Image (cartoon, grey):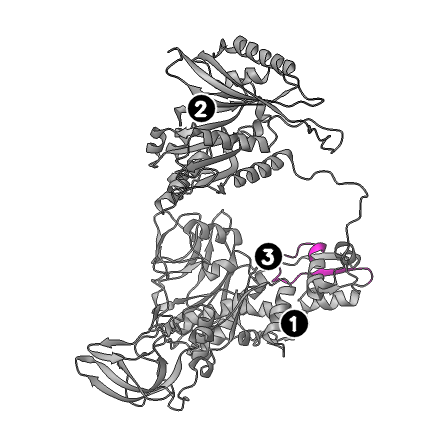
Amino acid sequence: MKFTLSWLKEHLETDAGLDEIVERLTMIGLEVEEVTNRADRLKPFRIAKVLEAEPHPNADRLRVLKVDSGEGEPLQIVCGAPNARAGLVGVLGKPGDYIPGLDVTLSVGKIRDVESFGMMCSERELELSDEHAGIIDLPADAPVGMNYAEWAGLDEAVIEIGLTPNRPDCTGIHGIARDLAAAGLGKLKERSHEQIRGSYSCPVAVKLDFGDTKPMCKAFGLRMVKGVKNGPSPKWLQDRLVAIGLRPINTLVDITNYITFDQGRPLHVFDADKVKGDLVVRRGRKGETLDGLNGKTYEVDETICVIADENGVESLGGILGGEPSGCTAETVNVLIESALWDEDDIAATGRKLGVNTDARYRFERGVDPNYMMPGLEYATRMVLVLCGGEPSEAIQAGTIPDSTNIIDFPYAEIKRLSGVDVTPAEANVTLKSLGFWISGSGDTIRVAAPSWRPDIEGKADLVEEVVRILGLDRVPDTPLPRLGTVGRKVLTTSQIRRNKARRALAVRGFNEAVTWSFISKDEAELFGGGSKALELANPISSEMSDMRPSLLPGLLLAAQRNADRGYGDVALFEIGQIFEDDTLEGQKMVAAGVRRGTAKPQGAGRHWSGSSGNVDAFDAKADAEAALAAIGAPVDKLQAYADAPGTFHPGRSGSLKLGPKNTLAIFGEIHPRTLAALDIEGPLIAFEVYLDALPQPKGKGGRSRGALNVSDLMPVRRDFAFLVGKDVSAETLLRAARGAEKTLITDVNLFDIYEGKGVPEDQKSVAIDVVLQPRQKTLTDEEIDAVARKIIANVEKSTGGVLRG
């Protein structure tokens, strides 16, 4: 909602300045979003006088002007405006000035071989109106050299407030002024309720015809004014509309737009000579169309309310007028409409047709029903003053509903709900200044909300009105009571795991991404989804038709988009939900990541010390293990299996499991076939960690972390090389070595695999490094040898491998 300061003061007698008004608006709940000034963009433009206007030597329609800008020597300007002449006083733009209506910045140029040092501007070029027939022609006494915006009174603040949907009364400037007056910032100027006496009966009748269905229009007021003179509206009216971003059209249309913002009462005008027969307000019929005033054609049906005549549909009720009956400069007889539409139907029609208008914005929130006919009178007065004419009697179809809502209001509710001490006298004055009716005395009174406040339903709403007007700064600061105990954890286990996984992956060089939760059918089927149960009933587009069965499609496509823009070495991760089915249990929380190019944990790209090389499956495995370790998974007990889904490369992928059936993560290189299906260039590696698959931690009696278990004795390292069959996995051997002596063995690492000379063809040599950590005393050679024998025996038992000689 936009308005100018001078416009506001037409409704509010106040000496308050802009800053005070802006602050008070926000304090009473009408939050100011922006304060702008048209003069800021018009600041460079000065009033200038044309001294000479000679024909252009090389163009019949151009003139070469000598222009006095009030600063030094006259400027030479080439101009094609038909009204350019010697003695004209206009508005000058010089090189370097930005022309908002053309979206260009002026520079010195040559036009047909004649240099031009700026331009004389039209109103459209300065976005003052649509007038472009010639350059601006100012009065002869306009001061040359003065800032044009300042001289024309355009240096005025425009205030924009963000209205919540429950404040339809403030969609008009009069309602905003009422709130400010109630808050002590001036006196509200009351609206005129003078009625216009018509000299003849309205020749066009109105009928509300909804049959047995729910009425989509509650009441409809109409009046004809014949013999009007339409055309451009007065400058003051055009200036106000332009200031708030509206385009002046003609006087009749500008009057309706003005009253929409001034009073919060949308209206519509029909060219009476283009209306055939009487008006009927009814439901649309399939096959009917309307050419709207916005240049678009709309198809209507029985869910849409229309205003029709014998020609067909003339208007979308309460939303948009039609081109066939629109008012133009040739309009002589006009029908003025003021109606009361059903809020829900207006909102549904607007969404269905995709039409957003100022009328829809107000009607779907609820306009003042009791101002329907006064609004018609207001519009009639403006038409008579600005266009002349002879009015008919006003007619009304339907019945204006009774909006009376009487509430029993105990004063004690103010203290109970807000903590503010307010005397009954203060409360009464505040409510009356907002237009509420008050009756009774004592501790409880009866309050009736005004017709323009449909949001007031009960006692709590009245408390809110009193407190916001008196000032929220009166609400006391009340600290919460101290419980005297240590608070229990607030986050759930799932939230804690997500945060820990997020930090762990960020530490490893990943950037977090957020992708859509829905993907195309082909992508969903590629990653094991695409079931009927996970199709969206109303998808945004065909590329977003199914709930995602995996986070990887979105991340892979995001990595490719980065590569397309020159950032090929990217590492992206995301934490979010995937969907196996449409049940609650089918929604899984997952942490996933992709790496592309050289984006390894230690860094990406080329370096003087040597490139890091492309990412591989082991990087993905390390990422998955890091995320699992961060959320508390027993990484040393996890088992690696080569059973990743088909979207991964079969020889360069795997899964991490806690037991044979509980998969905690999958990892590896993405299959080339998958990349081709997504039109992605590889190679890429990826992983997915299933955060919900890790068992819940067992409850503990306290929050202690336990005793620190650190030994001050030096660890002992021993290397072993075993000959095992080629089909034996390294993971099996490492697990066997680790389990040989659980007290002393703290780590087992694989550091070499060899096949070739000296090793039988059906075998391979696997070398491991075993770390022994004594706790009580230094180990003797005999104790170390005993552990070594256990390792050798356990490996032989588990894998059939023997110590390599």
Above or below, 185 relative to 367 = below
Identify which amino acid the numbered label 1 is placed on: Ala
Q: Which residue is disc 2 drawn over? A: 644
| Residue 49 seen in the current view | yes
Q: Main secondary structure of the magenta part?
A: loop
Above or below, 647 relative to 259 = above
Q: Residue at x 65, y 72 (%)?
A: 181
* Residue 473 horizontal/vertical position (percent): 72, 63
Q: Which residue is drawn at 51% across and 63% down?
A: 396
Above or below, 573 relative to 168 = above
Q: Residue at x 55, y 67 (%)?
A: 172
Q: Quick one: label 1 or label 2, which is nearer the N terminus?
A: 1
**Residue range highlighted in magenta:** 442-461
Q: Which residue is disc 1 drawn over? A: 181
Disc ID at residue 166: 3
| Residue 534 seen in the current view | no
Question: Viewed as shown, does residue 433 lie left or right of 796?
Answer: right
Quarter where residue 699 is shown: top right
Please say whether residue 454 is one of the residues in the magenta stretch: yes
Question: Viewed as shown, does residue 782 lie left or right of 63?
Answer: right
Identify which amino acid the numbered label 2 is placed on: Ala
Q: What element carries label 1?
A: helix
* Residue 691 horizontal/vertical position (percent): 56, 31
Quarter where residue 554 is shown: top left
Nearer to me, 724 or 275: 724
Nearer to me, 634 or 450: 634
